[in-house]
Image: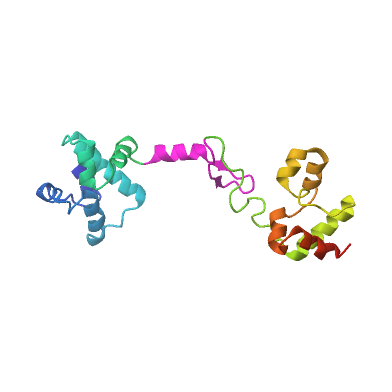
Amino acid sequence: MLRQDVANSGVTCPPRHHEETSFLDGRFSALGWLSSTSGRLGVPMLDRVTERRRAAQLARHYRDQEGLAIAQIARRLGRAEATIKSYLYDPTGDKAREVKARYRGVCRGCGAPTAPRNGKGDAYAFCKRCHPGAMAPEWTPERVRDAMRTWRARYGAAPSSYDWSRTHARRRGGEALNRLHAGEWPAPSTVIDRYGSWAAALADAFGDA
């Protein structure tokens, strides 16, 4: 049945005597033969899905018709034993794709799939393109300076590194967290990266005052 299926695709199976003699010394594999002859015989190169289906057909043939064990089939096809098991259990790969899909999420921004994080139902809320901050303008010294001045004008004092620390704001809660969420402020590490120290950033924004 396998040979008929492959024949219908335009590719003839390798001669049995070739399989029996060449598999032993490791110079030949059925999958390698299928891929290499497809171009020479004028058959379009196999895409991944088609190649997996052909490999699954060969694996089933060797198991059902020739009674080979998983390890023997793996040697013949030049694949790992786990791969052969997946061929037999999931010939098209649809089951594996369904499992992966259950762990993905949907981007709140554009609806594209998002990557899983820590298990089923815990995917990222945004894709990389739509993730908040992905397209945000860079925090230049000018922007940091303006942010510090805006903070002082709004709250009556220059910001401290604790004011702009999300970790400390969450711990303090209340007004500290509300202030942090009420505007767009750079992280303390960003300020120090730009100026070398928090004091230097304050000096740039407010002089000696």
Closer to the camera in the image, 7 or 56 = 56
Q: Is residue 115 magenta?
A: yes
Q: Split into 4 quadrants, where in the image is the N terminus? A: top left
Display coloring: rainbow
Choose between 109 and 195: the one closer to the eye: 195
* In-front residue for pair 205/115: 205
Q: Position of residue 189 (x, y in %)?
A: 69, 55
**Residue 187 appears in the rendering:** no
Residue 180 sits inside the magenta stretch: no
81 to the left or right of 137: left
Image position, residue 167 (x, y; %) = 70, 44
Residue 176 percent across, percent down from the top left = 80, 43
Q: Looking at the image, is 138 positioned above or below residue 131?
A: below
The residue shown at (69%, 57%) is 190
Q: Is residue 75 left or right of residue 127?
A: left
What residue is shown at x 52% (from left), y 35% (from top)?
120
Quadrant of the drawing holding the C terminus: bottom right
| Residue shown at 22% from the left, 39% from the top | 71
Q: Is residue 143 visible?
A: yes
Residue segment shown in magenta: 93-119
Numbered label tally: 0
Seen at 31% across and 53% down, the residue is: 46
**For residue 114, which quarter of the picture?**
top right
